[in-house]
Image (spheres, grey):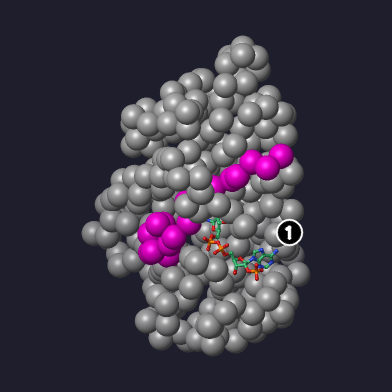
Amino acid sequence: SKAAATVLIPGWMHEHARRMLTTHFNLVETPDYDIHTHLSQEVRASIRGVACRARIDRQFIDALPNLEIIASYGVGYDSVDAAYARSKNIVVTNTPDVLNEEVADLTLGLLISVVREIPKAEAFVREGRWKSSDYPLSHLTLRNRRVGIYGMGRIGRCIARRIEAFGLPIAYHSRRPADGIAYDYFPSLLELASAVDTLISIVPGGPSTANSVNAGVLSALGPEGVFINVGRGTVVDEEALISALRTGTIAAAGLDVLADEPNVSDELLALDNLTILPHIGSASVSTRTAMADLVAQNVIAWFHGGAALTPVP
Ligand code: NDP
């Protein structure tokens, strides 16, 4: 029966999702994604659902001949080969919306940290330097900035609402104008970067955005330019960014995501005008629990109701 479906958790999964799935399904867990090593062909053939947070490639999908649903933890699903899954009639779900406001909050925090040097100013206090001098005035300010948002989707809109409250003008780029959005639209990222001095990237990863924030875009942003990335590290040409920050092509940057995270290169760490966060956009206890809940609810809805709650397009 559908209620007795077998669901695989390869590697890490949020405890809340694991608990929910255990009460509804026959759970199989493996220490990592090498399921050929861990599971017999018979067990693999019994698996109809997967709840996961990391890389699901063709080989993984081919190892599970009766798979119906892949429930991915997170809204970005660039690590899942969703096109291949679709070709096999497998539903892929993600966790949209429940993290929008949390990620937008972090984005504004990162922007202000970069512009007003909050992490450096705190370090100054902790190093006992306040007694001998005031902290130097920040060269940058949020005042009179023009903000460009690269990606006006669910999270982009939440970021824009916050920027509006800060009194700053907003423009954006996506492949087509966003429904019901009145901000200035630019059909190319380069044109957007030329029109603003602050660029916030909140587009998905994958081939269509890879290295799209390149040397030309950074140069168009200009010497007062601030670049903030909360989307995916792959969106940025990191060599070009490092060079732009070194030479003053732009003024400063803040990154919550890196191309090769959690590895951080010495070149990145050496930059004084760069703030790096360890991919914490959605990383509060409450929001991560809400994401885990949606992972499990998608699998439950699929096997008990016949339709997933949040399938990817
Ligand atoms: P949405 O799908 O709602 O929005 C994506 C936006 O990007 C849309 O405006 C879309 O418009 C635009 N876009 C997509 N592809 C391109 C492209 N090739 N060129 C230009 N614009 C493009 O996604 P969310 O807002 O929910 O999430 C966005 C991303 O943020 C996630 O995919 C994830 O990678 C990242 N993220 C990071 C987090 C963190 O912790 N740092 C947390 C959560 C999400 P159009 O299709 O018209 O081009």
Q: Can residue 63 be seen in this view?
A: yes
Secondary structure under tag 1 reads loop
Residue lying farthest to the left in this orientation: 131
Q: Residues within 10 Å of mark 1 (few under 14, many from 20)?
A: few
Establish if 54 lies above or below 159: above
Span shown in magenta: 88-105
Q: Which residue is drawn at 50% across and 35% down?
A: 51
Q: Residue at label 1?
A: 208
Q: Nearer the viewer, residue 305 or 66?
A: 305
Q: Nearer the viewer, residue 297 or 128?
A: 297
Q: Which of 56 and 48 is in front in this view?
A: 48
Q: Position of residue 296 (x, y in %)?
A: 41, 40
Quarter location, residue 199 = bottom right
Q: Position of residue 70 (x, y in %)?
A: 56, 39
Q: Judge from the rendering whether residue 282 lies leftward or rightward of residue 66; answer left or right.
A: left
What residue appears at the point 42 percent right and 77 percent down from the top-left corner?
161
From the viewer's perspective, is residue 92 above or below residue 190? Answer: above
Q: Indicate which quadrant contains ligand 1.
A: bottom right
Asked if ligand 1 lies within 8 A of label 1, the reply is yes
Can see residue 60?
no
Q: Does the segment drawn in magenta span residue 90?
A: yes
Q: Which residue is drawn at 65% across and 14% down?
A: 41
Q: Where is residue 225 in the image (x, y as percent from the top left)?
A: 59, 74
User: Residue 175 magenta-drawn?
Assistant: no
Query: From the image, which quarter does the C terminus lie in?
Result: bottom right
Name which residue type carries label 1: Ser
